[in-house]
Image (cartoon, rainbow, N blue to C red):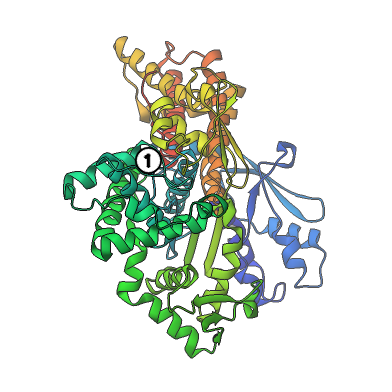
Amino acid sequence: MKKHLESLVSEALVRLRDDELPPESLRFVPEVERTRDSRHGDFATNVALRLATLIDRKPRDVAARVAELLPASKFVGRVAVAGPGFINFFLTPAALEAGVAEVVEAGERYGESDSGTGRHILVEYVSANPTGPLHVGHGRHAAYGASVANLLRATGHQVHEEYYVNDTGRQMDILALSVWLRYLEAHGEKVEFPANGYRGDYIRQIAALVTERYTDSLVIPATMVFTELAPARREEDQESHIDALIAAARDKLGPEGFARVLDTALESVLADIRDDLAEFGVRPDQWYSERSLEASGAIDRALARLRDRGKLYEKGGAQWFRATEYGDVKDRVVIRENGKRTYFSSDIAYHLHKRERGNEVLLDILGADHHGYIARVRAGLEAMGEPGTSLEVRLVQFVTLFRGGEKLRMSTRSGEFVTLRDLRREVGNDAARLFYVLRSNDQHLDFDLELAKSRSTENPVYYIQYAHARVCSVFRQLGERGLEWDAGDGRAHLSELEDAREKSLMTALGRYPEVIELAAANRAPHNLVHYLRELANEFHSYYNAVPFIVERAELRNARLMLICASRQVIQNGLSLLGVSAPESM
């Protein structure tokens, strides 16, 4: 209905004489919005206030003229000029009836639009270091990113989902070291496991896999590693100590031996992450390896572009990027004095390659602790000649998990964490997906396990799914009574739905396409969750007050038409959130 009203306003503007409005006004895209107060109509537009800035006329006079030239529509009962120059639209009952019929006819495609047609968006999310199982914090990134991608597709965008695999660097070295030390333990060596190594049963499981593949060929006496390190160093500087252990492991195993341990660990952890996400309904289109940046020459291309544009300089034997020229707080090292590239050089090369692949918008979904990352990557893009506005970053705040009122601790290094898989097994995929997007991504999330498992009206996933299941039960009852639903007859008699609850439910159904547009534009799946909860409330109120399977066929078919439309919208909305719509509960 919103688009229909916008087309009426556009036609009215075209009908205005050239001497009334300048030619550039015809390029205006009128914005029609739903009113907050039904006393002011169902929809309103401020187009007259916008036009008044171009001509020497009062906004109310312009509004009156536009209203006068609006084409007739069976969906508009009255038009009124209000306030400083708003044009208010009062819809006819036929508008609500047409909305119900549209839902049923469009089916799974109801709510979709072409507003994003032609826009290519790369959504990168999760991208957790492959150093262990995904924990509940990663789960929020996954649910949020997948839901945003679904919303963007529903509005016509070309979406590519990507997981960036950080398969190089110090964290991977620590993972390899941790696995190797557990491997040595399994072969009878006495090991002083570093306090800041990776712990947890999964490390021992990977160590067992190393044994399975390489038997005892990678066993080195632990004394050859630990006796060369000063004990004091281990206590006073844990980070230097673990770096020294890594260096010792590389030296004793040799490059090939260390790579065997590292690759086995990477393969195992990454396979677990892939399976975990797939079971969660999250399947990125591409798993982009950081190693491939080096192999493909992407880093060389990025640094060459910066160098050619005069954005690099040398200081202290290192190569620096002039990031402060683009708003960053300090210049950034891209090549260290030892000749090694920094993480930052990989980051900007990766984002340049995203642009080279034809993506207009680079939507990064990152943890809240990555706030400082934004300015430096945007600076890199701009310095390489790419628009800084192409980078869009959404930060996801932390998750606090509660069980029985008790806050659970999470630490990947110590092994004291609740995995995403554990969470899903306890509360189910549906509850996990919906609870993760209950609140805006920029707000902290308290995840109540007991509420997520409850079968109560306070549990939003249960409440919404129950509305869908209730509609299905009505249609089962219809069949049990030997009756059939005649959709055509139902549409023809929608005018018989005069109960206030019916009108309210019809109005709520008509809002769905607007909610999808808003949620996609604002990257805000929580808007959809709130809408579905409100819609479920409208339905439950209707269900509890009005009988559907009545004697008179015309009224029965009309009411069944309305609840069928309700079921369809709930199913469509839940699908975008990665949540199922069960037929019975």
| Picture residue at 38% right of the left edge, 21% below the top | 472
Neighbor class of circle 1 (other Cα within 10 Å; few <14, some 14-19, many 20+) is: some
The quarter of the image holding the C terminus is top left
Residue 565 in view, yes or no:
no
In the image, what residue occupies the spot 47% across and 27% down?
562
In the image, residue 506 sits, relative to residue 360, either above or below, namely above
Q: Is 28 placed left or right of 353 in the picture?
A: right
Give the labeled residue for mark 1. 108
Q: Is residue 475 above or below residue 393?
A: above
Figure label count: 1
Query: In which quadrant of the rendered view does residue 253 lie?
Result: bottom left
Question: Horizontal and vertical percent for residue 484?
Answer: 31, 19
Q: Nearer the viewer, residue 1 or 151?
A: 151
Q: Is residue 196 toward the left or the right of residue 300 in the image?
A: right
Q: Is residue 553 visible?
A: yes
Q: Secondary structure at mark 1?
A: helix
Which residue is painted at 32% across and 64% down in the image? 251
Q: What amino acid is found at the position of numbered circle 1 in the picture?
A: Glu
Q: Is residue 496 above or below residue 481?
A: below
Describe residue 547's horizontal placement relative to residue 371 as left or right: left
Q: Position of residue 508 (x, y in %)?
A: 56, 34
Q: Tell me the quarter of the picture where residue 387 sits.
A: bottom right
Seen from the viewer's position, the closer of residues 50 and 182 is 182
Q: Nearer the viewer, residue 306 or 77?
A: 306
Position of 276 with respect to 113 (left or right) is: left
Residue 225: % across, % down: 35, 55
Q: Position of residue 166 (x, y in %)?
A: 39, 59
